[in-house]
Image (cartoon, helix red, strand yellow):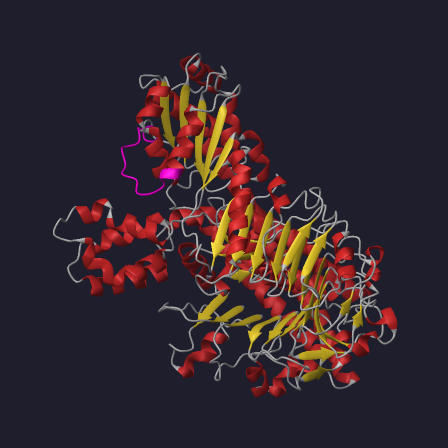
Amino acid sequence: MACVALTSLMATIELEFLQPNPSRVPLDAEGFISMESLYEKVSSLQGFVKEKSGAQGGTAIRELEIQIRDFALDAEDRIEIQLSNFLLAKNGEDQQKAYQQLHQTLGEAAENAVELLEKSKELETDEEEEEVVNESEGPLIPWLKHASASEPSNVVMVGRRRDHKLIRDRLIMWPSSELEVVSIVGMAGIGKTTLITSVYNDPLVASHFDVRRWVSMPVGGGYNEKGISQLLHTLLWTLLPEADDDDDDLAVAKQVYKCLKGMRYLIVLDNLWNNQALYDIRRCLPNDTNGSCIVITTTHFTGGTYGYLSYVHNMTLLNSEESWALFCNNPFLKLKNHMEPTKFQEIRSQVVKICEGLPHSILVVAKRLSKCDNIRQEWKKVEKEIELLGVLDRRALTHTYKQLPQHLKVCFLYFGVFPKRSAIKVKQLIRLWIAEGFVNPLEGKELENQAYEYLQEFIDRSLILIDNWSFYRKNKNCRMHSALHSFCVSEAQKEGIFCALNTQQLPRGSFGMFANSCRWLSLYTHKFDYYVLLRTNNPRSIFFFQEDADEIYVSFKFLRVLAYVPSSFLQRVPTRLYDLVFLRYLSVSGWFEGLEYIVSTNRNLQTLVVSSKESQLGTPSIHLPSTIWESPKLQHLELDKSYVIDPPCMDKDNIRTLSWVCTSTHYREGPRGHCRFPNIEKLKIFLVCSNPIRFDNFEYFERLERLSIISFSFDYIVNIPKPSMYPLQLKKLRLNGTYLSEKDLKVIEMLPQLEVLKLENAFRGKVWKVEEGFLRLKFLLLEDKMLKQWIVVSDESFPSLKHLVLRFCYCLEQIPEVMKFIVTLESIEVQWCCRSVCDSAKWIQECQRKIGMESLEIKIVGSEYDDDESECTQTEEFIASDDE
């Protein structure tokens, strides 16, 4: 894949030679010219690949892309070899030799790039001549007449009753002064066409509209300047089957307009691939303000499109019960009456798990199993095929992939490094993308924000699912559906970029061969039974989702990412740690002596995460060296409560995220302990001290938005500074075991920007009295076993509160009655609290219903009032993690 290789090469050049900080290799004027020349030509090749991306290219384009890919991979290897030799040189003579070879390598790579650019220009010239010949043959309308204009047949839809009713009611019960445009959005195979078919054939819908017409777009069909012509012709044929083929688009548009003028019509555009089609067709249809509607089904629409839509219906995957109901009530099994669904009970859990709520997957499995007698034996075959190949139309997936912008293709393939069906922490994914060099820097925009926009594009295209959100509507956890994951893995493997190793499955002697055949090496359990080895390819990233890696041997010289690596693995290869000069991202399961060298010598290190398998209470077990602060590009340092490190002796402007243990010695000199991070945005502090701690230096954290203070014991007294000494941008505050006084609680009450507050065993007394505050608070979590009374004096407090969570409040008498006046309140979740708290939550809900407010939802867990029938809101997803 040329785009991946070129992206990686350009990122290496930018990081090593074009950064504003001094380069690790001080190029002379001639060397700098060679480097700039190479970068310019690689950028031109990237532009060529981007232009041809998604085009119906022939063999010549494919062969040239392979040559470009191989060139970029080889050039990057050679550059990094010489750069590594320069950085590891033991004397000046070796360093000078490596520098000369690096200079020569840059020049040779630039010459090779010139040759490829000349080939690309020749290819473009040939294509232009070919297009002229094709145009002389006349206009081409690839959609066969009537082929896309057939009425949808009746379908039996299992479940989706709520979806059906919502869409139906939107079409017939929402009078509008404008032409209604309804969009049904969801991933491939989720049942969009089935849903709109059931609505289209609903008797109430059929009787409501004067004219109903259905146009199915071809799978993978393109949409260019002739697209509106093709679409208008097809729509005209649905309205007037006897219409002549007219090449005049204006005449066709007039006929369509005339046929629909004065009619209340319903037009369904099924499987719409391109936003422009909606804009174009909407302009050609009459708007008589009589309740006419356009319904589209699509996998994605860009954010700008939503302004043209009246209603967007996002389809969700089926839950386990719905999945099994669809399996048992599908037409394939019913064809064989002698096969009762009870015979499938023994594989029920496996079917539900592997299909992950995707209706198309469920129907494919049912169809296969309906044709066999030995269900268990056939299931093993089906399971293996689904895990390996997926069930979705590969042609459609390939088209979807080719339509991705160039910068998103490499990010899409990168999802394959994570195990199938695994939840992916978004903050880790974002940092990995940045470390790999996938995120293009834009002026005035930080890389993390840019990366979040990349992820949002995947969400908009229904390629990535969101497990939960942070309160700031940023994704906490995401995942790729297994049907898409299979495509992603195979696409990356066939290009020689990625290899997933199941160390428990392969013969041990073969590990090294596979480990050195790819750029991304991931160790995780899977059921693949094939690997593609196109060439020797020095790995840049290794992901340890399996710890059994004793016999994995890879070159450390080029590694940028070591993720989730057991410290035991690195301890077994101490002599190779000196080769890690390009490392940008490191997460390790525990600290060991050799790790100090890796951290202190890697000038490109951006993220360092050190965890511990065993959660330790009390005094940290390891005091880490202050050399950690010597990494000039370090932005994210996350140490768990097993480690302590002294503050740096100078300001660290790059630090954005910091989790560390704080001892009383850090505060003996006043604010100097923490004022070394002027740009920090997220701070988590673990308290380990025997004396009271006073935080009186938060005003130095001008950009701090999220603060967590966690005590190992409930006896530590924490004194909080005045509101004026807090960072003005603080939006989220978590206090755990901090033993706050009433005075400190008043300070928190007045924080001007606070939106999220989590108080977990943070009260010194048994009464919490709120006078008049928390004006912007939207989410509140209370967890306290001793809190008895919560008093809210003014009904003007908590005016913006949306979600309230009470957990383990065994002694709390009730929720304040003033909560019934909060019109913004959407949910109250009660977890393992006393009966009186549950009663007051229900009472508040009833009070709001009496005045016409029906939006408040109650969720009760862990009491005699467990409400299994109540519909839980997204509250739990906000508190599932402390990372956001």
Could you tell me residue 414's position as x and y percent? Answer: 53, 60
Quadrant where the image shows the C terminus: bottom right
Q: In which quarter of the image is residue 585?
A: bottom right
Picture residue at 14% right of the left edge, 49% below the top:
336
Is residue 525 part of the magenta span, yes or no?
no
In the figure, is residue 242 to the left or right of 398? Answer: left
User: Which residue of the protein is positioned furthest toward the right in this rendering?
Assistant: 669
Residue 155 is a magenta residue: yes
Please indicate whether residue 234 sits to the left or right of residue 709 in the image: left
Quarter holding residue 660? bottom right
Up the image or down, 851 lies above or below 380; here it is above
Q: Main secondary structure of the magenta part?
A: loop
Along the horizontal axis of the image, is 188 left or right of 1? left
**Along the line of sight, which residue is nearer the eye, 618 or 7?**
618
Residue 592 locus on image (x, y percent): 64, 85
Q: In this view, does 808 lie above or below 254?
A: below
Query: Can residue 34 be seen?
Result: yes
Residue 292 location, x and y as percent?
A: 45, 20
Q: Residue at x 49, y 51 (%)?
A: 859
Q: What stretch is highlighted in magenta?
A: 147-162
